[in-house]
Image: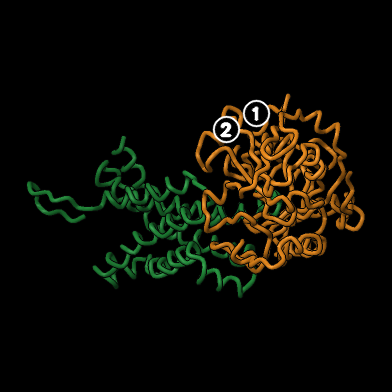
Amino acid sequence: MIDWINKTTRKLPTWPLYIGAALYPAWLFWLALNGGLGIDPVKGLEHAMGEKALQLLILGLAITPLRKHLGLNLLKFRRAIGVVAFFYVFAHLLVWLVLDVQLLGQIWADIVKRPYITVGMGAFVLMLPLAVTSNNWSVRRLGPRWRKLHKLTYAVCLLGGLHFVMLVKGFQLEPLLYLGSIILLLALRIKRPKPSRVRQSA
Amino acid sequence: MAHRWKNDLTHDDVTPYNTYLNRRQIMAGMAGVGLAAMAGTRASAMTLEPNSYEDITSYNNFYEFGTGKGDPAKHAHRLTTDGWSVEIDGLVDNPGSYAFEDIMKNMSVEERIYRFRCVEAWSMVIPWNGFELKDLLDMAGVQSSAKYVAFETLYRPDEMVGQKFRSLDWPYVEGLRLDEAMNPLTIMATGIYGKPIPNQNGAPLRLVVPWKYGFKSIKSIVKITLTDKQPPTSWNKANAREYGFYSNVNPTVDHPRWSQATERPIGGGLFAKRKETLMFNGYENEVAGLYEGMDLARNF
């Protein structure tokens, strides 16, 4: 089964992912305009983009453990997943800026004064160098430093999960499940000492 | 006695149903962003238009049915309100269980069109039907030692499915100072747009205190207790730093996680403009006197 998936996905191109990913927010926007997202389309759009971004970040984080522990190789999709996640975080931020908060003074006050917004902005800022270097040229150019730089993803995911946990009212399960999966996927990366085996590269 | 307060928002001075329908048609028919922006401007010029029955009954915070805004409308049909009664006890002359029908026979129901401001910084305008809480309390006979009124929502997890999960410490409880409870603006709502209040809005009767954040307006009330001590309130118990006992709408006192200076009117579409939040939600003339000499930043 896993072999079959690995063999099939090897033949698949990644470009349709980008197209589909770009169409999705456009479709949501169209729904928001036409009442398809309910009577509070601003929050509907904001939450949908944030939620999808977080799901993609988790998916991107799952790729290495899936390969290591199940032999499922989806590595070729990881760049697309990361770039699309950045694109959705950016859309989430734009909806918040332009449609939700609207006022420039209040936007800045919120970023500085409201911890969950500071945390969310932090995640976005950390994603910028990752998005800019998500291309073959940068991988070649930066060499081993590229891998190091892209470990920032771990911080981005933690901040994103934390952002969700911090913004809800009362005790809610959903954001904790997101943050929990992020922590689990990061924990799977912690190298345990393996005395009997020869050192492997991760 | 009733009619101690006259509506300042009326169906006449706001845009009535026809214009509302037209706007809906524009919204439904438009395709481009340009048109949408136009509709947004129109909507902002009519911010005092009461929200539609559909808006009011489909966008609710009623965690007893789930934490999503659509959850109450989805799950509240399970709630049975037949044979409802309200227990009134504590410092009253006539304690006991009051059947909902008996209460209604003795109360005079009137329409109150109130601004409704949620602590989450969104707002609506709602045409409630209800009676003044004072009339109900007078019926029970408030004793002179009473200083506060405590309220409690039904606890019935079989029907209120959100209560199966502890998003809050059930049952939901709220409270008012006695003078706040006796203010003519404070009503027990039993209807919306002249129809019996739907389950998701707090059937069969709920509190409405228009100058306080929405969560103070406790729904589906089964118990009212007159007391001489400040009663515990659900959101304050959940997070005392964020939710105070008073929770008066106040644009100058921010929620720790967001500003309360402005609000998003619900129902104006994707491009609705924020508007400034009014002190005491626009009821300053009626209620500011209740808090004279109080530090409202401290007693938030």
- Chain B in the picture: what colour? orange
Furthest residue in direction left, as rendered = A196
Question: Label 1: which residue?
Answer: B78
Q: Position of residue A35 (x, y in %)?
A: 70, 49
Residue at image position (86%, 46%) is B111
The quadrant in which the C terminus of chain B is found is bottom right
Tell me the kind of residue under disc 2.
Val
Do the residues bearing badges 2 and 1 touch, measured as CB atoms within 8 Å? yes
Residue at image position (52%, 33%) is B164
Q: What is the quadrant of residue A140 in the picture? A: bottom left
B293 is higher (above) or lower (below) than B49: below
Tell me the kind of residue under disc 1.
Arg
Q: Residues within 10 Å of mark 2 (few under 14, many from 20)?
A: some
Residue at image position (83%, 33%) is B104
The quadrant in which the N terminus of chain B is found is top right
Mark 1 belongs to chain? B
Checking the image for residue A93, the label placed there is none
- Chain A in the picture: what colour? green
Decide which of B160, B72 is in the foreground and name it: B160
